[in-house]
């Protein structure tokens, strides 16, 4: 028996048993859900802009609201349901980052707040946070060293 024929037979068997993925439906759901999340962020930004905040502050506030909302929905186990429907549409925006931090914390809640929630909270997003915080410190120090106005203010 030719081993190549065996691989082909096995591949045919696997293809027959695997469920077919509705690619167009999944892309459509990801598109409209991601768009809805971005529209919500834009509405939040416009709301705070009408309240007199500047553009940079509005973006920061909108990010904080979206992160808090997605963390809250993850705690209620609703974000996972949205994720099943939307796929990458719910995980690509900033909401997916909040979900990646809160999900491990919820999973290990039974082990206690220190060893469970505290230790496991950053298992997924920890490297991203460490890189982001370290980069911010390094860039801040470089900015402080080379910007004469910043040095005179300190």
Image (cartoon, rainbow, N blue to C red):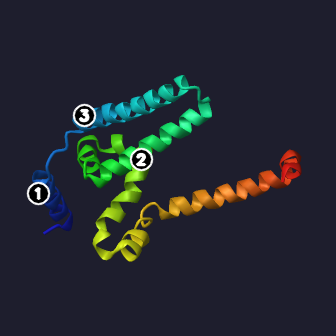
Image side of residue 64 versus residue 104, left or right: right
Farthest-out residue, front = 51
What distance separates the C-alpha of mark 1 from that of mark 2?
46 Å
What residue sits 31% from the left and 37% below the top? 30
What distance separates the C-alpha of mark 3 from that of mark 2?
31 Å
What residue sits 53% from the left and 59% below the top? 129
Image side of residue 85 versus residue 151, left or right: left
Which of the two residues, 75 or 123, is positioned nearer the viewer here?
A: 75
Give the residue number, with chain letter if any, for mark 3.
24
What residue sits 51% from the left and 63% below the top? 127
Q: Earlier in the sequence, mark 1 or mark 2?
A: 1
> Is residue 97 in sight in this rendering?
yes
What distance separates the C-alpha of mark 3 from that of mark 1?
25 Å
Give the residue number, with chain letter if any, for mark 2.
68
Give the residue number, with chain letter if any, for mark 1.
13
Q: Secondary structure at mark 3?
A: helix
Across and down, in percent, residue 118 comes to 42, 70
Q: Residues within 10 Å of mark 2 (few under 14, many from 20)?
A: some
Q: Residues within 10 Å of mark 3 (few under 14, many from 20)?
A: few
Across and down, in percent, residue 13 comes to 11, 57
The disc at residue 145 is none
Across and down, in percent, residue 6 comes to 15, 64
Q: Secondary structure at mark 1?
A: helix
């Amino acid at each position: 028996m030719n081993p190549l024929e065996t691989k082909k037979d096995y591949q045919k068997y696997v293809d027959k048993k695997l469920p077919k993925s509705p690619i167009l439906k999944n892309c459509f759901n990801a598109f409209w859900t991601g768009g809805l999340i971005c529209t919500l962020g834009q509405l939040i930004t416009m709301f705070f802009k009408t309240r007199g905040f500047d553009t940079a502050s509005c973006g920061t506030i909108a990010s904080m609201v979206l992160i808090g909302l997605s963390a809250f929905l993850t705690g209620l186990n609703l974000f996972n349901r949205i994720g099943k429907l939307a796929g990458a549409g719910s995980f690509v925006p900033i909401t997916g980052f909040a979900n990646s931090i809160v999900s491990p914390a919820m999973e290990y809640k039974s082990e206690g707040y220190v060893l469970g929630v505290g230790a496991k909270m950053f298992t997924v997003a920890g490297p991203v946070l460490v890189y982001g915080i370290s980069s911010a410190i390094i860039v801040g120090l470089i900015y402080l060293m080379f910007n004469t106005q910043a040095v005179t203010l300190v």
